[in-house]
Image (cartoon, grey):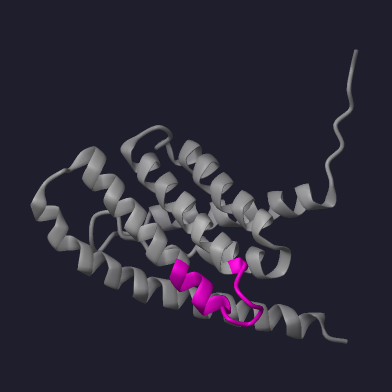
Amino acid sequence: MSETVHSTRDDHRIAWLTALAISIHIAESALPSPLPGVKPGLANVVTVIALIHYGWSTAAWVALLRVLVGSIVIGTFLSPTFALSLAGAVASVAVLRLASWAPVGLFGPVGYSLLAALAHMAAQFWTAYWLFIPHEALLHLFPLLMSAAVIFGTVSGVIALLTLKGLRAGASP
């Protein structure tokens, strides 16, 4: 008995957005890091745009598939790097879910991006602390890492904002 599986327009949208996020994720993995594990997180721009344009469900799929497929492509699947990335993605998706319930207009692209970056960094830090490096000295890095999250989250949010403005301008008659 053969069953035909039909993909929907949403499936195609998620696939395209995820492919874009994975491409950015892979490109970022080649960049040198100012601190171990600190990257700009530009793939999250795609997640924020997906959240604003298509809703939380699409954003969650894009974020989680990016981590899963990106780690397979890069070769970090089931490694400590994967665990940290997954923890960060799950935390940022959870925070974005909570923020998506806020009154319309409370958060824009910069606000969503900043919340996601802070949640992502905090989850990665505590995962690293509890699973890999349970040493008090690591706690001294937390303020520096959260500061990096504020900077990179703001930059990603501004990029998302400018991209959304460009998309809206391109959609105008």
Tell me if residue 110 comes above or below residue 117 in the rendering. below
What residue is at 44 percent from the left and 77 percent from the top? 155
Name the side, left or right, on which 83 lies relative to 72. left
Q: Is residue 117 left or right of residue 167?
A: left
31 left or right of 17 in image:
left
Region rendered in magenta: 100-115
User: Residue 68's spot in the image, x, y percent?
Assistant: 52, 40
Quadrant where the image shows the C terminus: bottom right
Residue 17 point in image, percent of width and height? 66, 56
Whether residue 134 is in magenta: the answer is no
Q: Quick check: 7 left or right of 82?
A: right
At horizontal 30% and vertical 46% (from top left) the residue drawn is: 127
Visible residue check, residue 40: no
In the rendered image, the residue lying farthest to the left is 137
Q: Does residue 110 show up magenta in the picture?
A: yes
As drawn, 55 above or below 131: below
Residue 102's spot in the image, x, y percent?
60, 73
